[in-house]
Amino acid sequence: MPNHLSRTELEIAPAERSSRMAPWNLDSVIDGRKLRVQLRAAAMDHLQDELAIRRRALDLLHGALFRGRMIAQERLYEGADGLETARLLAAVQNEVITSLYEFTSEIAFGDTNRTEGEKLAVVAVGGYGRNVLAPSSDIDLLFLRNYKQTPWAESVIEYMLYMLWDMGLKVGHAFRTVDECIRLAKEDLNTETALLDARFICGDEAIFDRLRQRYRDDLIKGRETQFIAAKLEERDKRHKKQGDTRYVVEPNVKEGKGGLRDLQTLFWLVRHVYGGVTLEDVLANREVFTEEEAEIFRSAGRFLWSVRCHIHYLTGRPEERLSFDLQPEIAQRMGFEDTENRLGVERFMKRYFREAKAVGSLTRILCARLEADQQKVKPNLLSFLNFGQSQKLSTPGFHMESGRISIDDADFFEKNPIEMLRLFQLAQANNADIHPFALSAVTRSLSCFDESHRTDPEAQSIFLDLLINTVDPGPILRMMNEADVLGAMVPEFGEIVAQTQFNMYHHFTVDEHTLLAVDAIAEIERGDDKAQLPIAIELFPTIKNKRALYLAMLLHDTGKGLGDQQIEGAKTAKSASLRLGVSEEEAELVAWLVGNHLEMSDCAQKRDISDPRTIAQFAARVGTVERLKLLLILTIADIRAVGPDVWNGWKGQLLKELYESTEAALTTDHTDESQVASDLDARADIARTALIFRKGDLPNLLSQMEPAYWCAQPDAELDWHHDLLTHEKIRTIVEYRVNHDTDSVELLVATWDRSGLFADIVGALVNEEAQIAAAQVYTGKNGGVLDLFVLQEGDGQIFGRGETQRLERLKSAVADAIENGVAEVMDRKSIHARREAAFMVDPDVIIDNQGSADYTIIEVTGKERPALLHELARAIADRQLKLHSAHAGAYGERIHDVFYVHTQDDKKLNDEALREDLANDLLDILGAHDQGAPRTPARTLARARSADSF
């Protein structure tokens, strides 16, 4: 929600708007009275045959359960919400258990006169105790007794459990007295919470009533502090385990931040402190939630439960992660359709993350009210909530309360909307948290913050100060985003809040990725991680416009969802910058950076950056060294913020090489191709001479390497290569080393070129189940080749887990492939096959004769699969084309491979018909072996087009 906590800002799917089905009538779903009559009749029909009685009873109970669960599933598919579905499933289960208990206690074991000590109460606990049940969830039962265990009670419980298990149910159970329950609850938070949810199903209700009374007397009265502290600590640990952000693109609907467990935690806190039994009891308490807040709670619950129920039905198991392969199908089922600029699955996920964000806002509101109420009536709670003496601040309207910034009056922000920005400035300046009372006031007052406040010089100054002059701006910007203040001040940013891109490359929502990118720039400015970011850290003090850099980073993805993200982003970035009060010239610079923020990454990773034309064209686009510096830092931060392990030293070296070549061209004004070629030759001579100085004479193969090789390799790599290649008499060298910094294996292959060599090497790597994260091919003047590969496991870990035996086997396989070729390449399934199958990637082949003076460039985009690079390289080799360089890269489910080739007589591929035939061959390869839609026990799932967005 961009500006305030309101249902009107949430995107509602068409199906949801029309899904208010008639309420279910339980008797029409499962007639408990009729079922119990049928059970008694079955007993009468088989009086002398206990096995036949049990078999018939099981059939009746299982049939009723199956029918009720099928009706619940059908209603969900027809538009009923998930909370209603969960309640219906619980109600059906209640009837089955009640009927089973009556049958067991009165018929199967009904021939004894039961004493007081043999009375039982069957109680639902946990989620089932809250009268909701997910389709594949366990049911948790508590069998309550008065005194010690008796043979009759044990027999009844055993019989019931076996019957439930035979129905295919997963049942958690306990058999305890009231005293045992209370004692265990005092020792264990999970037990205490489970008993808070306890609900009577059947049996002796008096025993259950005693449990409820003892719970109130022994576990609620005077224990508010302990319970609330424990539940919030439990929540924080759970968030940390799940990644401590609600913006991961495959969220855990139950346990993740902003998920169902957080809503349940709110329910537990309110119920423990304020009383109430059902959810509606809690939401009807106007001391806790306003009507609008209660409706936000209901809406979040309905939506999250709908998602969870669909996940369970689609997977046939208690899966809680909303994985990529499920997202398109659930989006379709819930009525989220594609629009002109937005995929239905992306609209669905945006709705998910906005609901998760609303749950966070409700949590802040509740904490504020808890503290305010307990200050009045329960002082013992104040120590947990950090309530203490107020300390006035020099800034009017604010005070410090036990280390947290708060406000003097609840309506302070409504009267002075700009002061909402000052709240965060004070928190940053004092290195303090913000009091939930103040955050709650922000939520209520956001609608007062309008265009007049955004353009107010004081607001502009506060905001830019927070962005630019803060050592670590990320945390405070994240707090502003959580409170919707960031989107209120910068509406362009508000539009990307909770936005996703349906691909496997990006790990976070667009807004979270942006804030992580701002974090990354701040890390560079502080000089953190010099080993990973040497050139960026070295250049940062020399840039002239830090403000433009930070603004560009904050706004770099605001064009997503509007069309061409760079073109549209440049427009939104300029308008936002001007509104923030920067000059026209600076706004143009911000717009240029946003409009070109992908260019340096694309050029470094998808082009031969030793080709003079590549450098000349890139230098012409950039224009000045200052822009080049800003673009380099922006690019590095952007890549580092995509997700874990996306950034590595390989990419850093490519960007460094591109920067240095372009900087040399711009500094000397040598921007035509011949001058750039001379500069590259000079840089190569310097690197070559330095290596000779360090290591001595060059091995023959190295001495023939072209400038592309010398300009691309750092000194440490050159030293390693020199050491390996000093064995002049060895025709082929294959060697590896493990790089723990990048969780990869670096493989070097040095040999003599032949037709199909690269394809055979790649085929051997595929057969050894190596994931090729990156590849570079260098060709010498004398026919020697030096190929470099970065290898990982399919899950992103070090290939072979660093085990010597497997690495040596890989080395032997590659050497054999070089000598004898590869007879067959196993097109094995990716370990991410199910997730990848949800994506449709349009294959594309571009054959370009203009991008290089000497070579034809073949640029291929398609769906990732293990053997694809081998097949592409083989097709090129079969056309008798010589490979000069190759640049292979994977971006989630999408590959982007580039080959620089020429004919056997060292010319470009000038024949148009041959180019067209080759393109068709490559397109056929890209379209082959489509893994199709993912399958589940339920059905084949829908797919969605992968978002081509970096």
Image (cartoon, helix red, strand yellow):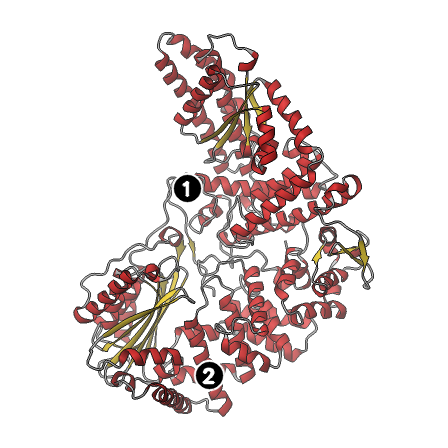
Q: Quadrant of residue 275?
A: top right
Distance between mark 1 and mark 2 Cα atoms: 51 Å
The residue identified by callout 1 is 315
Is 393 positioned to the left or the right of 277 in the image? right
- What SS does tag 1 mark? helix
- Answer above or below: position of 689 versus 204: below
State the image coordinates of residue 56 (x, y, percent, origin top left).
38, 16
Relative height, residue 788 to residue 340 (above, below):
below
Q: Residues within 10 Å of mark 2 (few under 14, many from 20)?
A: some
Q: Which residue is mark 2?
A: 660
Left or right: 335 with respect to 833? right
Q: Position of residue 826 (x, y in %)?
A: 24, 58
Q: Quadrant of residue 377?
A: top right
Q: Are marks 1 and 2 in contact (CB under 8 Å)?
A: no
Which mark's residue is nearer the viewer, 1 or 2? 2
In this picture, is 313 found above or below 736? above
Q: Nearer the viewer, residue 213 or 41?
A: 213
Graded by Cα atoms within 10 Å as few (under 14), some (14 to 19) or many (20 or more), the crowding at tag 1 reads some
**Is residue 11 visible from the viewing direction of this image?**
no
Q: Amino acid at mark 1?
A: Thr
Front-most of residues 257 and 377: 377
Residue visible at 25% across and 74% down?
914
**Type of amino acid under label 2:** Glu
Instruction: Please tell me which of labels 1 and 2 falls first in the chain.
Output: 1
- Residue 922 position by quadrant: bottom left
From this view, report whether residue 835 is shown above or below residue 452. above
- Is residue 578 shown to the viewer in this render? yes
State the image coordinates of residue 631 (x, y, percent, origin top left): 53, 76
For the point 52% across and 71% down, the residue is 529
Q: Position of residue 459 (x, y in %)?
A: 74, 67
In front of the other: 304 or 166: 166
Give left or right: position of 245 versus 58: right
